[in-house]
Amino acid sequence: METVPPTDQKSARQAKQGMVFALVGNPNCGKTTLFNALTGLRQKVGNYPGVTVEKKVGECFSQHGRRLQIIDLPGSYSLAARSPDEAILRDVLLGRRPDTPPPDRVICVLDASNLERNLYLATQILELGHPAIIVLNMMDLAAANGVEIDPKQLEARLGVPVIPCEAVNGKGITELRLAMSRADLRPSTFKAPIPDRMREAVHEIARGATRRDGAEPSPRAISEAMLLLTEQDGAAVPGSQGVPEAAREALERWTATWKADGFDWRGALVGARYAAISELCATVVRRGVGHGPSLSDRLDAVLLHRFWGWAALIGVMGLLFWSIFSWAEVPMNMIDGMMGSLSDAVTRSMPPGDLRDLITDGVIAGVNGVIIFLPQILILFFFIGLLESTGYMARAAFIMDRLMSRVGLNGKSFIPLLSSYACAIPGIMATRTIEEPKDRLVTILVAPLMSCSARLPVYILLIAAMFPSENVPPLQKAGLMLLMYVLGTVGAFFFAGLFKKTLLKGTPPLMIMELPPYRLPSLRAVLIQMFERAWMFVRRAGTIILGISIVLWFLTTYPKPAEPLPEGESPIAHSVAGRAGHLLEPAIEPLGFNWQIGIGLISSLAAREVFVSTMAVIYSVGEDAEADARPLREALLDAKWPDGRPVFTPLVCFGLMIFYVFAMQCISTLAVVRRETNSWRWPLFQLGYMTGTAWLLAFIVYQGGRALGFG
């Protein structure tokens, strides 16, 4: 069988998919903003196979109309991988991942206001031999801090194009596209010095890695050998393909010798690189004098204050929840009206029968029960994107670190918890940046307690049922919504402290966190992120929720009663779903929940927001045409127990909200926990303790409220 030479394979791939650029840089260097500026909406987001690390790939076009592919790699401060996301960065650049093509070229994004620190990763990447482009981002912030950089001098020293840029303002994007279109890009000429004591070891490991005994190792092999020596314990992070045995043996032999001699080989390599970078910066950077405190310093004096910092954080969260109720009311009514008109059109155009009921009561009612909350989801994601792009989100984590330390964790754990406000799945995946295994596991166990966006439709529906009057101020509703988020956060802290003192004892590591400078947000980047996440929500409504709504309609419709039912009795009670709800009712009746709510609890295990579409389906089955047009809120208010008592009283609605704050109603989250912990032990434990806590607190709320006369 004839084989195709690697060079021909590479040319064929480039002709089909376009040249591949890897976008790399430190966290908070503006890499994502630049990625959005280059690719716009031509992006695909997924995960790297075998690991829960996000993979973002986008497309743009060169100045000559040629297709270019850009891979946005995880941010890192070094190629010496100590976590799965850093290992992805290293392995893609080294061509170790068969699922991702090796990049043809590399774009290194540097924060111009912190050039020396950013050059550490950049020089490691440049030494790998890829044709590269340096992007000096945030030049405006550098100038504001009195930092002047000579791009031409830096270009001459590194041997690669250097593009000054302000990605948030769109400045430098055209120049970057021109540089990406160049056919004469070459690898960098920069080489970090090797300490004399380590030269022989580096060359031996490099020869072993390339299986070239006795031959002079290539510059790339030397760079890879230095990476191996700076990685923790001299070993590759699990998930990489490792290195040849000869290199491994040489690595273990030399590190054992140095340990015995008390020689810090990692420190020597890092120190030598920083010394070379410092010498480089001395020739290309000039710092002004007489500059007072920067704008970031002046803002931090208030926003990180012991009192005003908390006041600002609470104010920001309160504004977020107030806007969710006040700004979204009009578009929500529009969506509800459109879906109602669609249901009426289907009713008029089709004869009565099960098929019409399936479309109107199953498909339309079920999807409308969730899609109507899209405006709130858009507002939530807009605010989250705004806080992230301005740099305030890192300040929120810094403020919360003071509280986190009291439960045995630190700010590194709170960053995944912040992500869990949008969805627990990326929050749990974000724990891969936590180096201490016990801290990582504790964070995974409590992350689902942070109220995610999937709970938002449930909260909004139940709050609307609690306050049916249109005269209730939005601020009052926002306050109750904020209370749910506070309860989830307090619960996460409580269980984190409990687990750190019992199951997973350990001393929390010191937190080292970079606070990025404040900057004006890129509205384009925020909108792209908002619509990307919103589309995932809509896609979920159009797939999982649509499928569940259809299945649920069948379960709530069949089998049909063989004989006419007594007046007031719903046929849903005799269906498969009704029988399942009746089986569950004895366990949830002490909470004030009836069997219809039990059906909602079961179905929402697929996704929490499915509870809303379940209620929409249940309370549409068996009703007349006039009832179909009523808002779901009114249907809930009309729901009665057999003795005539209302089901959805304010006390029951509040208890049900408490239940959803603490219950693990998401199979997808359990699957991700299983994947992250590589065991069913912890997801089952998580399901047990969260469900038990939810039941107990809902029981206390309902029974305690009745005892106090609120029933």
Image (cartoon, rainbow, N blue to C red):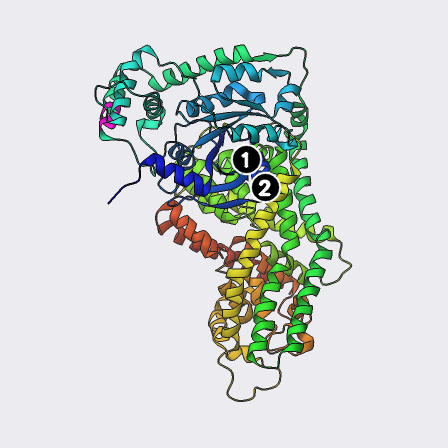
Which badge, 2 or 1, is on the more N-terminal residue?
2
Taking the image as drawn, is residue 501 in sight? no
All told, the count of numbered labels is 2
Counting other residues with Cα less than 10 Å from the Cα at mark 2, is it few (<14), some (14-19), or many (20 or more)?
A: some
Q: Nearer the viewer, residue 706 or 287?
A: 287
Q: Quadrant of residue 473?
A: bottom right
Lateral position of residue 88 relative to residue 365, left or right: left
Tell me what residue is drawn at x 60 percent, y 48 percent: 531
Residue 76 at x, y percent in the picture: 46, 30
In this view, 181 is above or below 695 = above
Residue at the bottom extreme, as displayed: 563
In this view, 375 is above or below 116 = below
Kind of residue at badge 2: Gly
Q: Quadrant of residue 208?
A: top left
Q: Nearer the viewer, residue 678 or 108?
A: 108
- Quarter of the rendering occupied by the N terminus: top left
Q: Secondary structure at mark 1?
A: loop
Label 1 belongs to which residue?
62
Label 2 belongs to which residue?
40
Residue 362 at x, y percent in the picture: 56, 71
Kind of residue at badge 1: Ser
Tell me what residue is drawn at x 68 percent, y 73 percent: 344
Q: Which residues are magenta?
A: 246-251
Lateral position of residue 90 relative to residue 214, left or right: right
